[in-house]
Image: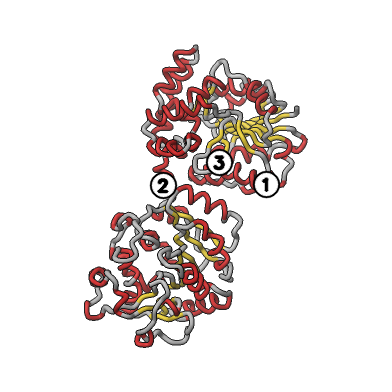
Amino acid sequence: MKRIAVFAHYDKDGRLSNNVIRLIESLETVCERIIMVSTNLLDEEIKQLPTKVQCFVRENVGYDFYSYKYGIDKIENIYTYDQLLLINDSFFVSSSFRMEKIIQTVDNSIFDICGLIDSYQFNYHVQSFFVALKKEAILSVWFKNFWDSVTVLDRKMDIIFKYEIGMSQSAMSHSLLVGSCFQWSSKNYWNALVNSYKKRNVKLMFLSIFSYKYLREGNASHLLWKDIYDEFSICKWEVVRNYPEAVTYIEKNNEDALEVKDYLNNKALFYIDRKIDDVLNNELSTQVYYSAANLVNRFDSKKSDVAVVLHLYYLELLDEIVSYLRNIPMQYDLYISVVSLGAVFEVEQRLKYYTNANVYVYCVENKGRDVAPFLALLNTEILERYTSVCKIHSKKSLYSPQGTNWRQRIYGEMLGSTSTVLSIVNKFKNDNSMGIIGPEESYLINEEFWGANKEKVYELCMKVGLQKEDITLSFFAGTMFWFNPKAISLMKNLNLTIDDFDSEKGMQDGTLAHAIERVFVPIARHNQYKILSVQDLEAEIQDDEYANQRVPVL
């Protein structure tokens, strides 16, 4: 078996720790060559490396995945190897650690890509601190495509989702088998449940009520640190930093206590102070990263004058919506709000090959229907860079048998053909006074459609400067339309956040979201912007012509 390893190294002092030396010695027993990629190893330390190790020192950017890519690029004739090991120094190895034992398990497995530990946290993946790629993976089209796509990313969250999770997911999409050496047993599930209770992991405890298998959505290297240490003689350094009981267990077992104590005394604080601990273990950090407020940090640069804002509560409608979005004939930015982290990753995965748009997915609490997520995005001011924006959502109107027909009619009016979209976009581009263009059949002005919202609409409009006598009922039912962000800029002065909305209870009328649905048009007109229907892009809407208009679901 011809085997090569790429070993990603970082040490705050540029030194070789005893732990790293032990790991390299273990790799020597199973590999013909070791490509070591360090971001700061000192010259005098490099001289101590065994002859099998070829060391490269690169700039300290991009974390371990860029070191993996850097090392892979240094391998001549990589296709002549039967196996490629990707390993970093983020875990402790005890004196009883044997790489041969792990490699035997890898070789006996059916997997083309075999990690030491896998996880279903957010999406299935093998953890990247140890991954073995067999010949089938190395020779695949996926291998070159994936590693060519790896670039320097400075945000740990980007690396985790695009590369750690992305590596497993993209490999599986190319029909490669992905799995791990560690296989969960009934004892492991029980220990995971006990540890979830000890660590007050309410989410895992709740999910385990429905099926014990949901415990695998936790991080096994944390939940089952003892089981993994007993089986493989390793322990992740962040576990050592954060789990005193793990330190006690290691100290109790053998002479490895000195190595662990040295780490805690000289290095642990460095990582804690810089918050380098794996953010994958902190769901709150993940939620912050995928919030609307953080979109400004995730946004690369302005590439289009056109954007679409989609609230996707019903994931099953994504394909239908995309079929309409394909009618947008230019590159655009697509902002998608969803109500769970799981939905974030599902949407990103399903749209990863959608090249028509630059896709940005953000997560919101399930409040305020499509309106609260829209305001969360509007408040970031990120929409102000666009000339025209299309606001849509996955509307079902389950209370009416006409819900599907109505939704599809709205989509059809707004996005039904390339010529329709082009006409709308050009209207905004050529007329700075254009405010809102909406679906003809959804425009309502009849007093009966105030519902239980009249006083709240007055309150909201007056809060941003409208006079009560100037406020009339005029709105696009369903809250889907094209708009100029400048036309509704006053809505930011409402200072509404997701916390101002009630939790979703399926109410058909009388909520804050229903009131806001009715303020878009009055605010745009107050700002001296025009309101048009898609059916007639040459003349402003005359309200008196819509006095008898109805929509099928209201």
Give the x, y percent position of residue 7: 61, 31
**Number of marks in the rendered image:** 3
Q: Residue at x 48, y 51 (%)?
A: 343
In the visual, does 511 lie left or right of 62?
A: left
Give the x, y percent position of residue 280: 47, 39
Sequence-wise first label, 3 or 1: 3
337 is higher (above) or lower (below) than 328 = above
What is the CA distance from the residue labelled 3 to the residue labelled 1? 15 Å
**In front of the other: label 3 or label 2?**
3
Give the x, y percent position of residue 135: 73, 36
Residue furthest to the front in view is: 401
Q: Secondary structure at mark 1?
A: loop
**Quarter residue 338 falls in:** bottom left
Amino acid under disc 1: His
What is the CA distance from the residue labelled 3 to the residue labelled 2? 18 Å
Q: Residue at x 59, y 23 (%)?
A: 23
* Residue at image mark 3: 124
Sequence-wise first label, 2 or 1: 1
Amino acid under disc 2: Gln
* Residue at image mark 1: 174
* Residue at image mark 2: 287
252 or 119: nearer the eye? 119
Q: Secondary structure at mark 2?
A: helix
